Structure formats: C-alpha cells, structure tokens
Amino acid sequence: MSFSYTLFLALLLLAPGLGLWAGLRAGERSDLISQAAEKPGSTFSLLVIVFGALAGHILLSALLAVQAGVCGWSGRCIVLPFDPNIYRVILTGGRSAGVVSDAAFLSWFVSLLLPALIVGLAAYRASGWRAVRDMREAATFGWLKRWVDLARPANSVIIAYVVTTLEHDGANVAYEGIVENIALDDDRAIRMLVLSSCDRFLVRITRHNVQRIDTVHAPIPLIQLTAANFVNVALEVIVDAAGPPAGHMPSSP
C-alpha cells in the first residue's frame, strides 16, 4: 500500500477534533449506564470533530501569533534554521520550511499534537460541568435520566423487577435486585441489566390477578439479563435514610 500524504495530513489536521470527541466520550463514562457505541456516520460526532479541530487550530495559531508578537516586541528571539509555524509551512507548500532537519519534524509534530492534547483535556474536564452533563445525559439516557437523577444520592438505589421468558409450572421466573448497570439500544429501550443482591420469585397471571410466588433461597450476588430473556421491566427508586445497603457501592452516573 502506497503512502498517502493527503490522508496523513488530513488525520493530523483532524487530531484536535478527535481529541475533543475522545475527551467527551471519556468524561461521560458512568458506572450505572453502559456507554453506547457511536452510530456510524453520526452527524453530531462529525460536527464535534470538525469544530473541535477548528478550535484546536485556532488555539495553536493564536499561540504562534502571540509568540511572534512577543518576539518582535522584545527583540529576544531564538533563531531557528526552519520555520516553526507549521501552518505557514503547510499553506506555502513547504516553501517557507527552511532547512528541513530532524528537529524541524519534531517541532512540527509537537505543534500539531499540542492542540489535540489541550482540547481533549478541556473536553474531559468540561464533561463534568453541570450544564454539559445535563445536555449529554438528556441525549444519552432519554427517559431514564429522571431515574438516574433520583438515584444519584449515595443513599438511593434503583430496584428493578424483571419478568423473564423462562417458565416453571405455568409461571414466569422473575428477579428483583439492585441495578448495577443498564445498557440501552438505539430506541432508548433497555437491552441489558446487571442486578446485585438479586431475589428470584415466580409470577403467575390468572384470570383475576397477578400472583407473586416467593421461595426460600439465598440471594444471587450478581446476575446479567438481556432483553431477549425478559418480558417486562419495572424500576423503582428506593431511598434509605440510614445510608446505602451494606456491601453496595453507590453508582456514580
């Protein structure tokens, strides 16, 4: 495969935008909600990358302009055999590069890496701000955001009641436990649940009512359920005035 200078240059110029996207994705990690994969061809992700790249290059070009201004004003400059302004080198097709040495390549690559690191770190820190977090969670969680907000305090947990497709003597097997992790699909429907301190029981639907049949058994420490194996899910937020349940680490959405 031949080397493509155009593709290589495009990736370098998009690096700040990719840094912004990576910073936001890293900052939105949650113990409660599994991070959904990016949709192929997502317009929002494309906008984040493009505007992040622009912001990073504006930042670097501003720093280079300030450096040149300070150098001209003070008269104290370090004379280099190459042009340290990577943008001028790119736009002039290398005519302003000067003596292209190993130090020149090092300087240019560091210059292109710097805005990507700065923008990525800024995006990661900004993802923890209340306004940014609310906007991100509204888009990510959808209807589940209200429950996430209610369960955010350390003394609150989400209890899930899951009726599965597994049957026993004409009744469906069901589970009740503390929600440790939830994964959503593209329609914001629950596609996976992880429950801890889980109780197992039977649900029988008759002509007159719905019966819960409990049995004596030890609680299940941890169980994972997928949408293909359950019929219905009910959620309830429990607030414990005495604190979180023993042995349970509260989620940090």
Image (cartoon, rainbow, N blue to C red):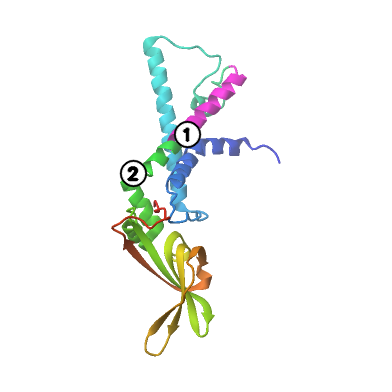
* Dominant secondary structure (helix, strand or loop) of the stretch shown in magenta: helix
The amino acid pointed to by label 2 is: Trp
Decide whether residue 106 is among the magenta residues: yes
Q: What residue is shown at x 41% (from left), y 53% (from top)?
A: 249
The range drawn in magenta is 99-119
Which quadrant would the N terminus be assigned to in this image? top right
Crowd rating for badge 2 (residues with CA inside 10 Å; few <14, some 14–19, many 20+): few
SS of the residue under disc 2: loop
Instruction: Write down the quadrant of residue 81 in the picture.
Output: top right
Residue 97 visible in the current orientation: yes
The answer to whether 243 appears left or right of 191 in the picture is left
Q: What residue is shown at x 37% (from left), y 62% (from top)?
A: 158
Question: Which residue is at the front of the view, 176 or 122?
Answer: 176
Looking at the rendered structure, which numbered label has been put on residue 153?
none
Residue labelled with disc 2: 129
Residue 186 visible in the current orientation: no
The amino acid pointed to by label 1 is: Leu
Point out residue 23 in the picture as x, y percentages from the top left corner. 45, 42
Point out residue 150 in the picture as x, y percentages from the top left corner. 31, 58
Point out residue 152 in the picture as x, y percentages from the top left corner. 34, 54
Crowd rating for badge 1 (residues with CA inside 10 Å; few <14, some 14–19, many 20+): some
Residue labelled with disc 1: 117
